[in-house]
Amino acid sequence: MNLIWVPLLPLLGCLVSLLLGRYPRSTMALGAAILPAIALGIVVSLAPEVMSGNNPVVTYDWVPALSLQISFMLDGLALMFTLLILGIGLLVILYARYYLSEADNAGRFYASLLLFMTAMLGVVLSANLIQLWFFWELTSVSSFMLISYWSHRSDARKGARMAMTITGAGGLALLAGLILIGEVVGSYDLRTVLASGSLIAEHSLYPVIVVLVLLGAFTKSAQFPFHSWLPQAMAAPTPVSSYLHSATMVKAGIFLMARFYPVLSDTQLWFALVSLVGLTTLLVGAYTALFKHDLKGLLAYSTISHLGLITLLLGLDTELASIAAMFHVINHAVFKASLFMAAGIIDHESGSRDMRKLNGLFRYMPYTATLAMVAASSMAGVPLLNGFLSKEMLFAESLQQETFGSLSWLIPLLVTVGGALAVAYSLRFVHDVFFNGEPIGLEKTPHEPPRYMRVPVEILVVLCLLVGVLPDLIVGDLLVAVGASLMPAGVPEFSISIWHGFNIPLLMSFLAVLGGVALYRQRRHMFNFQARFTEVDPKLAFEHMIQTLVERARSVQLWLDNGSFQRYALWLLLMAIAAMSVPMVNIPHARGSLEVTELDMVAFGGALLMIVASVATAMLSHQRLLALVTISVVGLVVSVAFAWFSAPDLALTQLSVEVATIILFLLALYFLPQKVSLNHLSPGRIVRDMGIATAAGAIVGTLTYAMLTRPFESISSFFTANAKTGGGGTNVVNVILVDFRGFDTFGEITVLAIAAIGIYKLLAGVRLFVPAADMDGRPWSKDSHPLMLMQISQSLLPLALLVSAYIFLRGHNLPGGGFIAGLITAIALIQQYVANGVVWMRDRGDLKFQWFIVCGLFIAFGSGVGSWLFERPFLTSWFDYFYLPLVGKFELASAMAFDLGVYLTVIGATLSILANLGKLTTTDRPTRPGRRS
Amino acid sequence: MELIFAVTVGVMVTCSVFLMLRGHTFAVVIGLTLMSYAVNLFLFASGGLALHEPAILADGAEYSDPLPQALVLTAIVIGFAMTAFALILAIRARADLGNDQVDGRALPGDSLANKEPQGKVRQSTVKSTASNTAKNSGGKTR
């Protein structure tokens, strides 16, 4: 069956568990187990293929352009881990059925567990680096959910957070490392990467890659100094600990090192880093384990120590070290999972995990005690058990390595010390819990667990024995297949047997056992000595670190983002100036190659006027009415400039917009202070702002000059050439607007409409502070509207409408069009409001300007959609010439309908902005529903 | 001519940036308006400065670049909408917050009451604090 089902089935199982959330726990455990069991079946059926050196691969393209693939591969290494993950996973599912109580939400537990299983399977099966990383992070996330399963407990939440932070941070380092590998190799395909070892090793980035990948591995596998999360993760339910923290999650880092062993390992840097970290972890873990009173704490530190052992083996520069490492992965997973389960049983049936209370349990649960004692002996490295074999291999390999030159003799010595410590803490686990007097102050009388809760432990312990007695028969072939993954060049001959004769490793084992027993006998002195250290709770230290970090981040954030708009604007402008000045510095001369045109007096006068008016606006901004006068001068001169430089359409638009803008500002001044004092302005602030402003102005000015004096390639010749033939108009600007780039224009009138609607909403129900007098205390004039103005405005209206119709109609061929005509109409109507007042206008038909906008947009859209009827793309235009008596020849174009939409939208938007604001000055203002005053 | 054009745009940008860094909403909106003038001129200039060559097709004439013009035309209208929106936002902010600072935080001695000493609240739903200070200040301050 297809390999993809192996990770997929547990994922489906995750859904099954969620769906079975209301059923009894047995049903749920069964439901959760079925799919992984099938997956295990698939893996077992594929195993012979893998053993014969033929690795099954499945690949699906995902985003080929980014070399992203969904790709799974089952090689020897993946096979070993897959068997561990699925096998122990199934045992844990069975175990958890009895461990969880009625009150626990077993559905959520199984779902998280199976999600984690999927993630782990994804990690070990991935044949694409990015995909591997994805599953790697998924293990962090799902283990977060598992550790914090009892989320009402503070230690569970803190422990989960700590595990997530440390492994997640390592995951980011790993991502960086994987991307570097991908860039160096030019492919993210694992098989390509594994085949290009020398390419990576000789690359200048190799040290960076090694350090980043190892950071990922060390954090995940709880290597010193990143080990502190693992003991905190013991707040998880014990099935989780026995699954994640013995067999799978913490082995992911080991797996990663093994996965990249063929390409990354063959250098002094690797050996030195990995072996030193491994050795330190081995010793620190074993030493600390001895002093833990919590059963699970002891097991956690012992796990750290054993992970260090495996890491050390991966860092030893000898032929068989990596094989020994993988062998120990299996052995450790088997005995440690069973020990965790035993610890869980003891906790479950006696109500405590404290070894100071737990004593003499052998009498209460002899069967469990025997199982735990066998597993603990394996942990200590007692002969005839699997732990002995891999420890013996470690001793043998440690004698052969030469990484540290003349200091290399230290390694076997320290490893023996580690062995002695392991014997000591194993002895403590056995002696303190099962013998050593009577239990002290237990809440309930300990007893044997339910029959089937013991089954997983039994299976694992039997495995310990079987592997210990018949190693070659049971795991020999598997290890050869694993070796083929680690050493593609060829696996050296090896045989694992119980008896190698009297040799130095055996002597080391003997010394370790002796030393361990001696250490345990003298434990009182060691405990006394250890008590003189002040113990730091890693959880609190970690929380403190996080809080400090958050505080620092907040102070930086407050410095950047103090809630002040002025500060934002400052940063934004500084950024823009910085971004612009770099390329400007790289242009050698501001002056380009084009001939400049001669300065004429009109342009000079206009420019001078603009400069003076701009500066005056800036200086008079506190005298707001005056500032309005000066800025309107700028606007008017801008429109003259457009006219001067051959842009009549722009000139017309600017002129009419200018009128609307100034009316708008005048209205706004009614609601805003008309004068403000500048006393609060510090001179430093003024100088600073002037400096920034000058820098920005200088850059834009230089850029303008540089642009104007340089030749450029324009695409406009296309528009000029096709305006008449393709768009049916001679006013190229208008044809571009309504035809060539009609879709743009459609977007723009939509923006206009949105702005108008936004303003309508802003003004609806506003609680305005309406002044009864102007700034000098003069009350508003009570006079009715001046008669002359009324009369002139009223008689001008039809004329203005006529002009706007004319401008609209000729727009396609001469300056004009929907935008300009719309503005003229709007201004003509505004003029009526100004002259006659809101009430007078309302009496003569309350125009709903929103409807103008809606109709305008609808017409514009409709004229675009219309072209679909003729099977043309959106907004394809059509035109033709007709002849009518009296009128003569005239043109009809679909673009005119579009322009009509523009026209209506512009009227609607402008008027709804101005008229709505204007209405606020009267009693006619809109109010919030139900709040009418 | 190119030089004086560039200088003008530069001065306009300088003035507008200075205004945009001010604390009063009105100054910022004025600055935005001035900035949009400058940007429109700049965009327009990207097609070059041509005299007496409008992009109206006729026989054999030279034409100014119509594309920047079309872009600027819509930019003018959108600029108006943006100015209007910012201005109305300023009015709304003043109504809701009681001051016309961009940060919404009143300066010392810059409260609503000092601005419009005779201001009467026409709408009953106005903020009570604002009306109280208006009453308490009692009369002209200027």
Image (tube, rainbow, N blue to C red):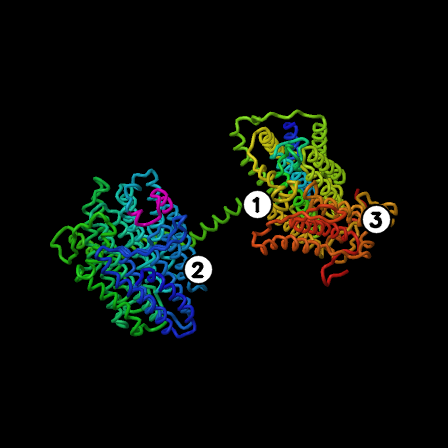
Looking at the image, residue A842 sits to the left or right of residue A253; the answer is right
Q: Amino acid at mark 3?
A: Gln
Closer mark to the observer between disc 1 and disc 2? 1
Give the residues drawn in magenta, as a range. Answer: A178-194
Residue A332 picture quarter: bottom left
Q: Is residue A69 above or below residue B3?
A: below
Determine which of the numbered discs, if any, sits on residue A794 in the image: 3
Q: Which residue is mark 2?
A: A157
Q: Amino acid at mark 2?
A: Arg
For the N terminus of chain A, give its image quadrant: bottom left
* Main SS of residues in magenta: helix
Q: Position of residue A389 (x, y in %)?
A: 19, 57
As measured in the structure, the alpha-carbon distance from the residue carrying label 1 to the one carrying label 2 is 31 Å
The outermost residue toward the left is A501
Residue at image position (22%, 50%) is A321
Residue B52 is at least partly visible in this image: yes
Residue A286 picture quarter: bottom left
Q: Which residue is mark 1?
A: A561
In what element is the residue under mark 1?
Answer: loop
Closer mark to the observer between disc 2 and disc 3? 3
Whether residue A30 is in magenta: the answer is no
Looking at the image, residue B63 sits to the left or right of residue B111; the answer is left
